[in-house]
Amino acid sequence: MSNKKKILFAYDCMMLGGTTTALLSLLNEFDYSKYDVDLIMYKNSGEAIERIPAEVNILPPAKRKCRMPEQIKKAWHSVWNGQFVKAILLKLFDRSDNKKKSWKMVLWQSTEKAHARISRKLADEYDVAIGYIESWGAHYVASNKVKAKRKIIWVHLDVKNSYMIPAIDLYMYKKVDKIVTVSRQCCENLMTMLPTCSEKICFIENVLSKIDVNKRANEQISFPVDHNKINFVSVCRIAFAHKGLDRGLHAIKRLKEEGVALGFVWYLIGDGPDASESRSFIEENNLQDNVVLLGSISNPMPYEKEMTFFFLPSRYEGKPMAVTEAQMLGLPCVVTEYASASEQIRDNVDGLILNNDDEAVYTFLRNLCLGKYDFSKMRENVLCKQFSNEETLKKHEELLE
């Protein structure tokens, strides 16, 4: 009989993105002589599914066949169990200082419990079950669909500055044994917003291998870049409310109308709900010479290493893996001030941290056109940064004991 611990990871699907990168990096560093690892996804799909280590046992998907359309079934369960009404009331009577909360996010939160309820139940019992994302994966592990001696969920977002209302999911937080955040500031923010669960909340950085990043960056591609111009890149989901790419687009339009010489090209790698709107905006305002949509690319790193710097004008973040990946490639990063920005970047030393507003993005791009930044010096400093997973992996192992 095996003495290995049985571990379950629950994850929505292997879509491209920072959370998927974090999960794959962690799974690649696992000691499989100690652990038997199962992975269940709601849908066994996504561009990164082929990168799952061979040692991981991929279970059949949790999604069940149903005659009723999935969205209707989720909505029905949400109303039936009272979660929808609860979410609406919490939204109406919310008194926090976060003005960003949107009805769209509240409705999404209200259906995630239902999303877990319509998933199939697992027969096996696990030593540890981990919901590795704050959507279906976390709700599924917290539900009675999963039997485990210990249950842990990961929260990759900065809940305070996102559009979420933690009280909507309080039942979920109470049912698990540990809640892991990915930055110190995100940890403090969540403790403040969930004081009754503060003893469960901890901080563990994401795992990322510099060796793997550099290996992937060496893939041969044909991608001509004009190095007489400043070239910068954003690798993220094209979702304005989260990633703030609309800030950059509107700033570039404004600069062009003002007659400022735009000696740069901004490359956008990714896909998402606002991709078509981005494309239309670029075409309508004749920005094609300065903004290039490359779409979803399974390995963006060979493209990134050709750039002058990495750009992320997000409205909120947890601790974005894309920033760390860019730094491992030697790129200075220019970001807006999200929760963990100062944990990743030394402002004006190896990157820039802008105020988190539209005007700051405009001012930065204007100053960029005027040649006010020395990215070569920042690049030297980025190349001196040390990246080690040793302490982080030790914390992950302690969490599983």
Image: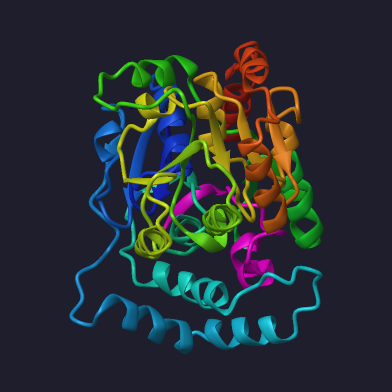
Residue 386 relative to residue 199: left or right: left
Magenta-colored stretch includes residue 156: yes
Residue 380, magenta (yes or no): no
In the image, the segment drawn in magenta is 146-174
The residue lying toward the viewer, choosing from 177 and 218, is 218
* Residue 127 can be seen in this image: no
* Residue 196, above or below 397: below
For the N terminus, the image quarter is top left
Q: Position of residue 42 (x, y in %)?
A: 32, 57
Q: Which residue is drawn at the image coordinates 40% and 83% (left, top)?
A: 75
Residue at position x 68%, y 31% in the image: 344
Name the spot of residue 145 as percent of width and height, x first. 40, 62
Quarter the C terminus occupies: top right
Left or right relative to 28: residue 224: left
Q: Position of residue 32 (x, y in %)?
A: 38, 22
- Please tell me in which quadrant of the rendered image residue 350 appears: top right
